[in-house]
Image: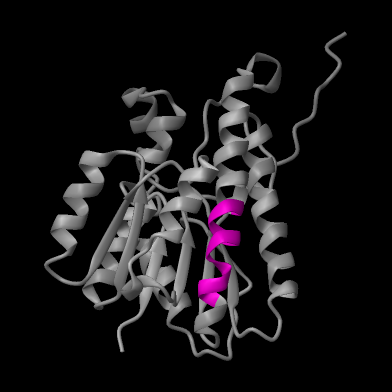
Amino acid sequence: MSKTLFITGATSGFGEACARRFARDGWKLVLTGRREERLNALCAELSKQTEVHGLVLDVRDRKAMEDAIASLPPSFATLHGLINNAGLALGVDPAPKCDLDDWDTMVDTNIKGLMYSTRLLLPRLIGHGRGASIVNLGSIAGNYPYPGSHVYGATKAFVKQFSLNLRCDLQGTGVRVSNIEPGLCESEFSLVRFAGDQARYDATYAGAEPIQPEDIAETIFWVLNAPAHININSLELMPVSQTWAGFAIERNKA
């Protein structure tokens, strides 16, 4: 019996890599994305390997999410897995210089969008029961502070705690919840954060051997295929090149 997986933000980065990885193993896919042309092209490509249903929508749009999920074809009705991947960071300026619109967008996408997809799909995951999984994409930014992380890091701290709380509420249903927390990863995510600044993007990853989206996809594939009696609560990944900085100290220059 084929398994069905719902992936948000599937048109680039981790979401696209996960779609390709699970398609190779024959999982049926429901893929969401804002960019219609990209989503349609990906669905057409992967439909040669498995059944794919694409949903062009923004996870921030609660009504659109409700309508799309309610109208899923019967063959996609029961879900084995949900990957809450849709998310973004905007800007690296310190808090006093940030645009409130950017903060709103991060909260609406990283927190509210994840809430919408999770709550709306919970009945379908519970309907599957034992072995069903929710995988949330967190970040090391939810664990460790750094300059310019402000609201982005706070949204990922929400993902961390929300994942833990979900586990409590889902006890007895057989549904598992995991929070994947990547460090330095090379993907379109950073180009969005840098407002399309390719030079800054290139400098960020130069010589660092960062994590690739395919690495995260393989990790999530392992998590979703773990024995049904095992829950991976959280998994933090960093490239070997990345470690922690020391505490910042402001010194009196007088």
Residue in view at x 39 percent, y 25 percent: 200
Residue in view at x 14 percent, y 56 percent: 44
Q: Position of residue 3 (x, y in %)?
A: 35, 80
Q: Quadrant of residue 232?
A: bottom right
Q: Is residue 146 among the parts visible in the rendering?
A: yes
Q: Is residue 212 among the parts visible in the rendering?
A: no
Query: Count of labels shown?
Result: 0
**Residue nearer the viewer, 108 or 152:** 108
Q: Position of residue 237 (x, y in %)?
A: 52, 61
Quarter of the rendering occupied by the N terminus: bottom left
Asked if residue 81 lies left or right of residue 177, the reply is: left
Magenta region's main secondary structure?
helix
Residue 138 vertical placement versus 193 (above, below)? below
Is the image coloured rainbow, by chain, by secondary structure, or in one colour? one colour
Asked if residue 216 lies left or right of residue 156, the reply is: left
**Residue nearer the viewer, 109 or 180:** 109
Q: Position of residue 150 (x, y in %)?
A: 68, 33
* Magenta stretch contains residue 124: yes
* Magenta stretch contains residue 208: no
**Range of magenta residues:** 115-125
Residue 62 vertical placement versus 130 (above, below)? above
Quarter of the rendering occupied by the C terminus: top right
Q: Residue furthest left?
A: 48
Residue in view at x 57 percent, y 25 percent: 102
**Residue nearer the viewer, 203 or 118:** 118
Q: Quadrant of residue 175?
A: bottom right
Residue in view at x 46 percent, y 30 percent: 193
Q: Quadrant of residue 163?
A: bottom right
Asked if residue 132 lies left or right of residue 111, the reply is: left
Residue 27 vertical placement versus 120 (above, below)? below
Q: Position of residue 215 (x, y in %)?
A: 37, 62
